[in-house]
Amino acid sequence: MATEILMPALSPTMEEGTLAKWLVKEGDTVKSGQILAEIETDKATMEFEAVDEGVVGKILIAEGTGGVKVNTPIAVLLDEGEDASSVAAPKAAAAPVAVPEPAAAPVAAEGRGEPRPTAVGPAAGGSRVFASPLARRIAKEKGLDLGAVKGSGPHGRIVRADVEGAQPGVAKPAAATAAEAPKAAPAAAPAAMPTGMAAETVMKMYADRAYEEVPLDGMRRTIAARLTEAKQTIPHFYLRRDVRLDALMAFREQLNKQLEGRGVKLSVNDFIIKACAMALQAVPNANAVWAGDRMLRLKPSDVAVAVAVEGGLFTPVLRDADKKSLSTLSAEMKDLATRAKTKKLAPHEYQGGSFAISNLGMMGIENFDAVINPPHGSILAVGAGIKKPVVMVDGTIGVATVMSMTLSVDHRVIDGALGAEFLKAVIEALENPMVMLA
């Protein structure tokens, strides 16, 4: 019996992708585990393997097609002896099923993906509204009435992008009583302030100037949405410290001479990763993420590191970084950065972690403030090491290599004193680098 091959969900939050390339053609016999196609998400290009054996009877989605929704039929696989001409046209994806939601359903689970759509109550016209769990959470935080939001997902399902683009305070939720309605939305209430100027408005402003219109790809759309959400919903505060690098630079030079024969060359960033991983263990309460209605305190030190790529950035995660040697961390970071730049990372390699590092020091930036990548509890912005006059231990004036560090903190997760304790632990490790070999 013919089997439909469906567009896979290659990450917990994937809703659509681009069928970049077919690696088989109609009539080909495929085996389980054989690579069928390359699928592009907003962050990576991934290979899609066959689960079953059979003959490719019909390719339904041409390569290069974007915006293909998850679970959309993309091809038909025939059993031995079946004829493609006898196969009926594939059925459309099933309509979402209304699933009763428990009153105290935990929000934390929503960050892991968007499973079955849930009916969230009647809209103004009496029909039920279907929305993903993540879309419901964002709508609740923004004060949106889902009944007034048009869904772009399969069968009108409301997905994350729909609520992120909607204006806050659209209307009182539909469950409000008639007596409450006038208070919530009086006739003379002003329209909600837009979060940004409409494209048409901006383009009119520059109608008499030469410009090139640059459409947003999936990565840039995701970055724009996530960082807008981060600055609007995360109560950031900032802790700044300087660290003297002279001992670390001398220690690094000594280690690199010893590692020369093994083809290993440690960077300052490798030491920073290790120092942060150790600090997450030394100050375990700072090793936490925000999960909607609770915090999750992680046991391992999973450190994300920002890597600039064409059109955006990735934050690959070095898992259990506190348990790895400097040379292992260096090799793993180089591998992740190389594959990030060619969009060859798997989702599990850039999702997760509780903390991130953004280092612009190699670009000459002395100091900056980084935006927290949700659900992380903090991110460390690292500047350049610069020789500066400093007061030495004996009170004399000397010269030292000084690096500025700024810790951006989610105040819901980490308070000021806790953040200061964590940053102190990072600096102590960097200024006494031999402890990183213990």
Image (cartoon, grey):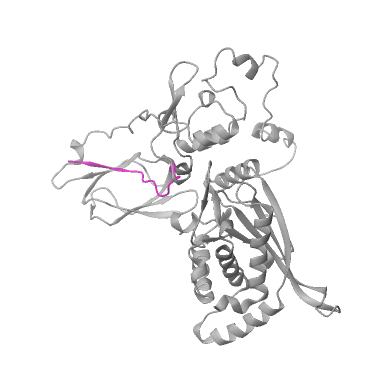
> Left of 91 or right of it: where is 224?
right
Note whether residue 359 is visible: no
In the depicted structure, whether residue 298 falls above or below residue 361: above
Residue 149 position in % (x across, y down) = 53, 26
User: Which residue appears at 21% of the width and 52% of the height?
Assistant: 53
Q: Nearer the viewer, residue 189 or 11?
A: 189
Note whether residue 241 is visible: yes
Q: Nearer the viewer, residue 387 or 92?
A: 387
Find out whether residue 4 is within the magenta segment: yes
The quarter of the picture where residue 418 lies is bottom right
Q: Quadrant of the C terminus?
A: bottom right
What is the span of residues highlighted in magenta in the rendered image?
Answer: 1-16
Find out whether residue 142 is within the magenta segment: no
In the depicted structure, whether residue 435 falls above or below residue 220: below
Residue 387 position in % (x across, y down) = 78, 74
Residue 62 position in % (x across, y down) = 37, 44
> Left of 48 or right of it: where is 394?
right
Q: Nearer the viewer, residue 287 or 258?
A: 287
The quarter of the picture where residue 58 lies is top left
User: Which residue appears at 62% of the width and 41% of the height?
Assistant: 233
User: Which residue appears at 18% of the width and 36% of the height?
Assistant: 86
User: Which residue appears at 60% of the width and 74% of the height?
Assistant: 267
Residue 221 position in % (x across, y down) = 56, 44
Q: Nearer the viewer, residue 356 or 275?
A: 275
In the depicted structure, whether residue 24 falls above or below residue 244: above
- Residue projecting furthest to the left: 81
Q: Main secondary structure of the magenta part?
A: loop
The quarter of the picture where residue 132 lies is top left
